[in-house]
Image (cartoon, rainbow, N blue to C red):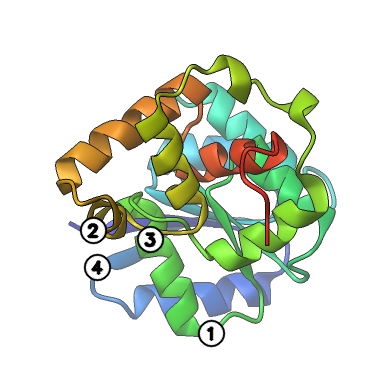
């Protein structure tokens, strides 16, 4: 089945470039476009995409606000990748904390854009973990920002969370721990549930913010 994508960016040229890259893939298709975050919720509700590529900076409603609106109001929200000019921008980290699944640079190569869409849809590995760790290094380490201590993770779940934070996929974690992939999926599910995290990106952000995982 085709992966449906919605584009939200105030620059028409950027949207046109992304559409050309995405529509060139046999398993991906752009189903809608918006020029501002204010239009994003209705567009997503109308098209029910699998992924939204969301510009983080827009003049009226920015990508952070639009991400929050979509995640709060959609019963089964899509994956959201914020698109930015500067990877160390505080807007990017705020978007990840708001629930975005990852981010892309506007200068990203076509292969990176396609890979990013497929990674977030699969949901079994972290998108660009090194870049997320770099952002976390600037913002993490404050236990007051997280309820991780009260989450009640088992030792094995804590171990899985640490491996998730390094960017390992479920298959790679299973090889590291010498357990089956399905067992890893169960542990990941338990971690997400206990941390009230939408996906592994949110769980990893929580791990860094709490100081449970130290960037480096």
Answer with mark 4 or mark 2, whichever residue precedes in sequence. 4
In the rendered view, would you say 146 is above or below 203? Answer: above
Answer with mark 3 or mark 2, whichever residue precedes in sequence. 3
Residue 140: in sight, yes or no? yes
Q: Badge 3, how many Cα within 10 Å: few under 14, some, many 20+?
A: some
In the rendered view, would you say 36 is above or below 188? Answer: below
Mark 4 highlights which residue?
A: 27
Residue at left offset 55%, top offset 39%: 202
Q: Badge 2, how many Cα within 10 Å: few under 14, some, many 20+?
A: few
Answer with mark 1 or mark 2, whichever residue precedes in sequence. 1
Q: Please identify, in this view, whether the residue under mark 3 or under mark 2 is nearer the observer.
A: 2
Q: Gap in Å between the C-alphas at discs 1 and 2?
A: 30 Å
Q: Nearer the viewer, residue 125 or 153?
A: 153
Query: In the figure, is residue 116 to the left or right of 135?
Result: left
From the top left corner, tell me how far across and down residue 43 is, in percent.
52, 42
Mark 3 highlights which residue?
A: 119
**SS state under label 1:** loop
Q: Quadrant of the C terminus?
A: bottom right
Mark 2 highlights which residue?
A: 175
């Amino acid at each position: 089945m085709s992966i449906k994508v919605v584009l939200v960016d105030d620059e028409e040229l950027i949207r046109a470039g992304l559409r050309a890259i995405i529509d060139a893939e046999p398993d991906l298709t752009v189903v809608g476009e918006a020029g501002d975050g204010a239009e994003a919720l209705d567009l997503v509700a109308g098209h029910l995409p699998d992924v939204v590529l969301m510009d983080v900076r827009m003049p009226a409603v920015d990508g952070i606000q639009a991400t929050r609106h979509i995640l709060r109001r959609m019963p089964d929200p899509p994956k959201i990748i914020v698109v930015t000019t500067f990877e160390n921008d505080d807007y990017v980290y705020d978007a990840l904390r708001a629930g975005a699944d990852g981010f892309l640079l506007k200068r990203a190569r076509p292969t990176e854009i396609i890979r990013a869409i497929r990674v977030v849809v699969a949901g079994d590995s972290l998108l660009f973990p090194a870049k997320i760790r770099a952002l976390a290094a600037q913002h993490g380490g404050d236990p007051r920002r997280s309820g991780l201590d009260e989450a009640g993770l088992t030792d094995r779940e804590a171990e899985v969370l640490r491996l998730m934070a390094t960017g390992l996929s479920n298959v790679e974690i299973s090889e590291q721990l010498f357990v089956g992939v399905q067992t890893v999926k169960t542990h990941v599910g338990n971690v997400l549930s206990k941390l009230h995290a939408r996906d592994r990106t949110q769980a990893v952000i929580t791990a860094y913010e709490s100081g449970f995982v130290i960037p480096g």
